Every structure is written in C-alpha cells, then in structure tokens.
Image: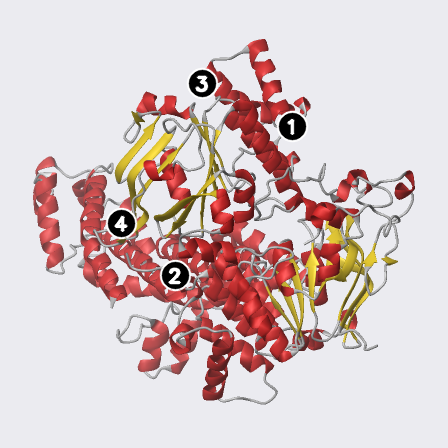
Amino acid sequence: MKVLGYAGRRLIWMLPTLIGALIVIFFLTQALPGNAAMSRVGQFVNPETIAQVKHNMGLDKTVPEQFVIYVGHLFQGDFGHSWKTGNDVIIDLGDRLPATIELTLYTLIIAIPLGIVLGTLAAATKGSWFDRIIHTYVTFSLGIPVFWLSLMLVYIFFFLLGRVPSPTGRLDILDTPPPHITGFYTLDTLFAGDTEMFGRAVAHMILPVLALVFVTSGPIVRVTYSTMSNQLTSDHIRAATASGLSRWRIVGRYALKNAMIPIVTAVGLTARLLLGGAVLIEIVFSWPGIGRYAVESLLVADLAPLQAVVLITTILTLLINLVVDVSYFWFDPRIKVA
Amino acid sequence: MEEPLLSIQNLRVQLQQNHSTAEVIRGVELEVNKGEIVGLVGESGSGKTMTALSVLQLLPPSLQISAGTIKFNGLDLLKLSRKELQGLRGGSVAMIFQDPLRHLNPVFTVGQQLEAVISAHSAEKLTKKQVREKAIELFNQVKINDPERRLRSYPHQFSGGMAQRVMIAMALSGSPKLLLADEPTAALDVTVQAEILRLLKNIARERGMAVLFISHNLGAVWQLCDRVCVMYAGQVVETAATHKLIEQPEHPYTQALLEALPRLELKRKELASIPGTMPGLADMPEGCAFHTRCAYALPECRLAIPELLEMGGGHLARCIRAGNLPQNTESAA
Amino acid sequence: MTITAESVKPGIPEAGKPLIEARDLVKRFRAGGSFGHGHDVIAVKNVSLAVYPGEAFGLVGESGSGKTTLGRLLLRLEEPTSGQILYDDKDITHLRGSELRQLRSAIQIVFQDPYQALNPWMTIRQAISEPLKLFRGLKGAELDRELANLLEMVGLPVSSQKRLPREFSGGQRQRICLARALALKPSLLVLDEPTSALDVSVQAQIINLLRELQRELNLTYVFISHDLAVVGQVCDRVGIMRYGELLEITTRDQFITNPANAYSRTLRDAVPEVGKLLPLMQAQEEA
C-alpha cells in the first residue's frame, strides 16, 4: 500500500532529523552559562573536588567526544543520569512523561470535538447571536494567558468555593500513587481497583484540563469557522442543497469532510504546543510533567534530563506531523502519494 | 388553457451591499408549461441565473427576494416551510449547474453522492442493493458506460462532459417535473456540448419534463428550446417561440444581439456591435433600461419602463415601438 | 503528420516567406512525481506550420488539444522539448536573456481572461507606459502622446489612464490589454481566446476592433480559440489541433464548407448555430 510506504519513508527520515536535533541541543546546552559540576557540589568547594566531579560527570572530555558517548548510550536506552533527582533519567521520564501525556490527551479529547462542533455551528448560523457568542469565546480563548486563567480558576473554585482539591499535583498530598502500569493515574487507579483514588485523580485533573481546553479550543474553533464558512458557500454545497439533501448531512458530512485538512493541521499544531508548552500549567498545579522537569533541570544546568526532554518532544512532534500528513490521504482522495 | 407548470410573476430581488440596497431583478415575468423547454437568454448581469436560483431559493444571503410570486403546480414556492422546500428541491424541481466539476463534492465518490440523493427522494425506504441498482439505471439513462466502475470513481477522475452527465443523473433521481439548467454546457468543449444538448432534449421529451435552460449562447438555445425569454438588466424584455424570436425579433435588444452573433458562414461581415455596455446597478437609466444603447430610442423611452406588449401568439416584447421596428433581413435564419 | 510550408500556401497570394514558422515542434511536460516517478504529458506533438505576414491564422481545438501550449511556444514563453521555431528566418528556439527580450517587442500576446491579465494595483497609465518606457525609451511629452495614441486606437477615452482595472468592464479591460500589447509595436500578435470571457455584444466590438487594427497596423495574428464562429469571422486560414497534433491546415472558406479531416468536420458540425439544427440533434428529431 502506497500510504504505508510513504509512512515508512517518513519514519526513516526521522532519524537524520533526530540526529540533527540532538546535535543542536547538545551543543546549545553546552553553551549554557553555569558550570554543571559547580552547580552540583556548590561553589565553595575546592578546585580539585570540582575537577574530580567534572571528571566523574564526563565533562572533561571534548564536546564532540561527549556527544558520541551520549548517542552511544541512547542506543542502549540509557538517557543519562539526573544528579538533581538522583535517578536515571529514564526512570524520571517514566513518571513524568505519562503525566504530561495524560493531561494532553484529555485536553485534546475534549477540545477537538468541542472546537469543531462550535466552529461548524457558528459557520452554519453565520450572523446569528450564537455566531457572535462563539466569536467572543474565541477572542477570549486566544487572548487570555493560560497561567492567569489557571490561577483564577484555582482562586475561584478551590479557594473561594472549595469545590475542587488543592492544586498539589495529580493526587492528594497524602496519597501514594497506584502501581505503575500505564503511568496514567486515571487508568492505573482503576486497574488497582481503587475507585476512591480514581475519583481524586479525576478531581485533580478538572481545573488544569479546563484551563487547557479553554485556551486550545480557540484556534480550533477559528480554523473550523473559517474553512467551513468557505465550504458552505462553495459551488458543490450549493448543488447539494439544490438536490434536497438535509442540512445536517450537507453541513456535517459534505462540507466538514472538505474542511478537515486545515482543521487537522491546526489540531496538529495545537498538540505540539501542548506537549511543550504545558509548563505554566504544570507549575500552577504542581503537576509533575516533563515541562517542569525540563525547566527545573535547566535552572541548575542538569543537562541529561534537559537533553532527554528535548529529544522526546522532538520525536513526539515528528510523529504528530506524520499522523497529520497521513490523514490528508484519507480526507482528500485527490492527494496522492508522489 | 392549462395552468403553466411554473409561473413567475413580478419577481424582484434586492442586493444588500454596505448598507445600501439595489434591485438586481426588477419585475420578472416568466412561464414554463408542462413538458416545455424554455430558454432564458441574457448576457452577464442580466439576472438570468439569479432568476433560476430564486425558484428554489438558493440565492446567497446578500440577495433577497423582495416581491413577487413563484408558483409551481399552483403551489406558492415562496411560502413553503423549510421541510417542504427541501422536499421540492431535487424532487419535483431539480437543478443542474455550470462547470459540473466544481459542483460535485471532491472528497466523496460519485456513487456515494448519487446514492445519497436517490435515498433522499425515494418514497419508501430502499435497501442498499436497490439504491445501487437505481444508480446504475440512472447512469445508463445518461449514457455513462461502465456504470459500476464509474460509481466508485471520484469527480476529479471525470471529464467535464461526464461530470455533467453525473449531475443530470442526480437531478433525474427524484423524477422531476421541471429541470432548471443553469448554463450546463458553458464550460464544455463544443463536441461535448452538442452531446449534452441532445441528451437533455431526449430526456425531456421522453419524460415529458419541462426545462428552463439558462444560457448566453443563442445557438445552443436554438437547438434545444421551444420558447425563449430574453433578459436584459434584470427584466424579461422579449419572449416568443424560438423560431419566431429568431425570424422576427420585436425588441431592439434581441435584434441587436442576433446581429452581433458571429456565424460560421462564408460571408464575412462587420459584426453589428451594441455600443456601450449593460448598465450596472448603480447607473440604471430612467425608463427603459436599454434606451441609452438603442438605435430606435425615442424621447418617450425615458419616461417609464415599458410594459410587455402582446404581439400575438404568445410573443411579448417590452418596447413601446415593438411591432414597428424595421426588420433586418440579415438576422433571419 | 507533418505539414510542410509548401502545402499551406493556398489562399495567400504573394505569400513570400513566413513571418513565423514552427518545424516539428514537440513540447513534453513532466506531470507529478518526485524520485523520478510521474509520467509525461506530450502537449504538442510534432507540429509544423507557417504563418505569413499580414494574415490572421486561426488555431482551433478543444481542451487538451495543445493550441494554447503551441501559442506559448511561438512566443517563446516556453522552450520546446525539440524542434525549431523561426521568426523572420532567425532561429529563436533557444534564445535567452537580452536576445529573448528583444523578441518580445516583435511578438506580443493577449490573454483570455482580462480580469487576471492586469495588475489590479497599477493604473492603466502605469500598465501601458511600462513597456513604453522600458522598451522604447519614451518619456515625458512623447510618452504622453504615445499613450493617448494607443488608448484612442483601442477605443478608450484618454482619461482612462488614471483609473484602475476594477473600474472597467471585461471588454474594456481587453482593450487595455490590446493597447499594452501594441505599445511595443509588434509585428505578430498571439491572441489566446481573447473573446471567450466576453458577452456576445462586447465580443462583437472586440472582433471588429481586432480586424480594424490588423488592417491599420498591418499586423499578423495567431488567433487561438475554441469558438469556431469567431475564428471564422477573423481568420484567413485555420489549423485544427487535437491531442497535441496538428491535423489539418485549411483555408477558412474550406473549413466552413468542406473540411478534409474527419475531426474537423465533427468540430464544425458541433457548433450550435441559430437557425440551423445540428446534425446530431436532427438525427434524433427525426426518430
């Protein structure tokens, strides 16, 4: 099948891209201010100790040498060691990556259909009060900073109304996480049969997901609205209307399928941004995700986690791009594999 | 005298543009009898397409029907509910358009689109097999070869002529009594155009279906139509049986149009062109819309919009001098 | 089927030598595909023809016939894949750079869609004076005079120059395009469906104008069109194309009364004329 071949070729081309990304990351992080060794043991230690620590960290080798060693370790599944958390990076990732992905997935599951439906309805009822409300919604969605929104939500719903748990992470402070199967607490608690903890995991997700859905649905609504508006005035839609098909069918199937390519592209963009940019949410809600992991490591020049996070994000971005591109073939039969 | 199948009386359509309104259809009178093929002829800006779109209320939001009645089989179309209108469209009254490839949905197969229309218009619920059979039968009627394979194809895999046949098949699925054809052959090659004209004529005669054929191509109209209405600047200015219109046009515009037509004939002549251009909405003349370009204009022409004068035998012309114009023998067939 | 220069002289009295000649022209386009996949479209297949000074040569065919591509080749807007083009006995097949630019003042084109052929942000004055300035080095009062002259020639008021294309109708825009093309004083004008986008009454105006200009300026036309009636009114000789091949070159009279090629006959018989039922329609009427 031609599409599979295309996907295969794209996956192979991912490797050079990753190497390139790695090179850039590696050399950029080297340029970071701060002496990694000194960060670790403090600046009041004598130079010999620093030199010793540097040697232990492998930082006394040349940068290209360090790079080669790093890549070699990668192939063995060794992402390095975070001296800040004391764990191997891969262990840390095992906790933090699912945390971010869980948040991202729930956000997308809600925001995508919501955005598409609202955008479609607004385009189909152009000029109506509903249309105007949606436009206002989009303006706010695009304009309100997510961290401000998060803080406001916490203030109102936790502090004032006490309806949601405190923003202290994925579970209550005294909870121990369920046994790790997927890393998604909403699933793992169910697997462990602990329905009360499941409830708490969900409760902790409400505000962050709400905030994220609010800010990510805006662009989706906007793209849907503009493409659908175009589609609804197109010749083939007029012909379909003239042939007496129901409005639902015309809008929801005939027009929407034509509009999917720009919409899917926007969704891909949103997904990529969510993965990388959920940092602010993670900070406000004390969410132990990879965004915070990267920032915290950056601040103390703990290089291995930083490099790992950038690597993972790059892989995920490339995969999202691939999925979006392959979906084009499905939506528009005029597009053929070259 | 039987009631006409379609009767448009005093149709007026307004265009909303930046807080100002202008009339684009200025009182159109039009009738189509059962089984009759009527041509609606005019140049761009005459309002012919808009008139057809008004019948099924397919005008874009900026255009509004401000007055007039449109009666189909005695039913006032402008007073229908949404559901009744939806039932009418593609059912008793169907429409085909210009540039068929743009009027077919590019992301669905032709079969899917045709079958959707078939299901929508069948009185009782049909099984998938029955729908498929009906689709193949329709394709056979419009002379599309290898129907099973074609049904699985996408519009972009069709040529213009084939795509128009598909549109005609879709239009026929509801067994319409009236077919509105908006320049169906304009975007097609001349040999394909001839075939489509023939197809339309055959189908119309076989089914006793009436057709309103909109076109700027007088030659095509002559091939197909029993009667012709000529439109200018949002009004019907002349209507007559086709051969009568060509042999003895009574409106100066029709005369001028026929004289301006290049013919594929040995004689080379200076084409009689009409000076100026059709007035736009902003500069519509007082009285008769054509008088500023008319060779026979009189001062009286400016005073009022002329009524449609009866010339006998269903021949009507909107000109105060109709019946008294010098006939130009060159415009005769 | 190649047609030599000799076989196409009928109808042209003192023909002399051709103004422009195509010899065995082939134009191949590569459609689709990276990595060397994709297939060829041969738009023009071994076409030879000659157009003589002062004549109006019609090029007719349906969509996909290659007539537009051939027109563009003659202008050297495209380079042929193989074959030769000779203008005034000079081989222009592979001209480049400044030599090609010089050719532009000899051969000009008017396109089909007057709504797209004019830059919507340039006034008429700007549009027409550009070639006057660049190619003929005119400026000041001389430029103004020539500009007024051109506008008058195409039947437009001199005051038009300050206006933008959107203020003009289709027919008027086509006149502007003509004026622009004539600014370079070309000898050969390629007209690619110049009246197809126009209404009947406006079309008549443009056709009359084209005939008048040809007489006054002694122009040679290559008139590309799918509208046989229009070609019949403007042209002296007609070349019929189909699927990239030039099937026949015949005189206009011959084409109207009795074309030799079967396809030419099919084409002619398919043109819907007022007052005459098409053979196709006749057959079923009698049934």
> Which residue is disc 1 drawn over?
C155
- Chain for disc number 4: A
> Which residue is disc 2 drawn over?
A334
Q: Amino acid at mark 2?
A: Arg
- Chain for disc number 1: C
Q: Is residue B107 above or below residue C244?
A: below
Q: Is residue A313 visible?
A: yes
- Chain for disc number 2: A
Which numbered dot is residue C135?
3
Q: Quadrant of residue C206?
A: top right
Labels 2, 4: one chain: yes
- Chain for disc number 3: C
Labels 2, 3: one chain: no
Which numbered dot is residue A297?
4
A126 on left or right of A297: right
Q: Amino acid at mark 4?
A: Ser
Q: Please state which of the two labelled residues, at mark 4 or mark 3, is closer to the viewer.
A: 3
Q: Amino acid at mark 3?
A: Phe
Instruction: Name the quarter where the N terminus of chain A is drawn.
Output: bottom left
Q: Is residue A20 above or below residue B121?
A: above
Q: Is residue C79 visible?
A: no
Q: Secondary structure at mark 1?
A: loop
Gap between marks 3 and 1, in whole Å? 23 Å
